[in-house]
Image (spheres, helix red, strand yellow):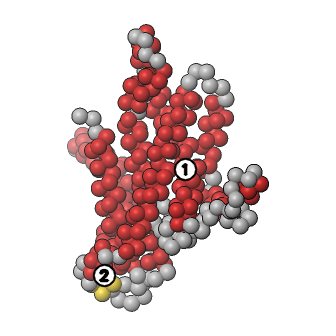
Amino acid sequence: MGKTRWNRQMRYAPYLYISPYFILFGIFSLYPIIYSFYLSLTEWNGASDKLFIGLDNYTALLKDHYFWLSLWNSLVIFLMYVPLMLFLGLIFASMLNAKWMVGKGFFRMALFVPNFVSVVAVSFVFVLLFNTQDGLINTFLLNLSWIKSPLPWLDSPWWARFSVALMVLYRWLGYNMLLLLTGLQSIPKDLYEAAYVDGATKVKSFFFITIPLVKKMLLFCTVLSTIGTFSLFTEPYILTKGGPLNSTLTPVLMLYNESFQNFNFGYASSIAVCFFILMMSISLIQMRLFDEK
């Protein structure tokens, strides 16, 4: 009897230990996803009864100019900073991984600090820096006579996108650099020594050993950056409020406006569902492109 009870406990104990995760996942992740999909099929302002309208929200969303504009803005911002961020991250990671580099701990911390500083505080600092009339950057450039008139950092569509991209680059360069550094440190040193014996230069070693062996980490950084760029909210909200002329409007910012300004929760839920499907599709395509044959 005792042995049977013990065997039963041994059989079900693992499921008991992992059950808290699945219970919390169901409550805080799975249920909101299912409920959001249900809301996307309704018309609801948060106070009245929900009116089932089928796929009307999705039909309206696909015809919505601002939805496509938000995707275009995210794509432009992505192209403005992600390739540069990955390139600089790989260069800095290579330098911090080199034997001749001194003060590695200081530079590692200096690059990573912007990532854990409050994004709201950083955004307000960038507002002061990029102010067109009396911002520090325009004042500095005018005093050096490098420009003849103030640059419209936050008042022109393309300059506004560029300003948002610069801020995101500043915040996430150190984080991606650390990820790439972990990838570099996992490469066996024997490979470089064998390449040097065969006459390979450091540049050839970088392109033919380093980059191929950190390709998976580059993929990971690219997927994270893609999701992060299309999910931008705080940076464009504080810097430009999505303007000028909706040039920094992102899908998440549009979702916020529909939810908490227009109180159109059904339509906002359809944005969330389409955004989820789009991000999953782009991530799968990126993983497919980086996949080794």
Q: Which mark is residue 169?
A: 1
Q: Quadrant of residue 68?
A: bottom left
Residue drawn at the location 68% of the way across and 62% of the way down: 150
Give the amino acid type for the residue marked by disc 1 in the picture: Leu
**Where is 162 relative to 105, above or below?**
below
Residue 164 placement, left or right of 9: right
- Whichever of labels 2 and 1 marks the residue nearer the N terminus, that label is 2
Residue 256, position in %: x, y?
A: 47, 73
Residue 221, position in %: x, y?
A: 43, 44
Residue 71, position in %: x, y?
A: 39, 64
Q: Quadrant of residue 61?
A: bottom left
Give the amino acid type for the residue marked by disc 2 in the picture: Thr
Residue drawn at the location 37% of the way across and 84% of the way down: 44
Residue 119, position in %: x, y?
A: 60, 58
**Where is 190 relative to 227, above or below?**
above
One can see residue 2 in this view: no
Q: Nearer the viewer, residue 113 or 166?
A: 166
- The quarter in which the N terminus is drawn is top left
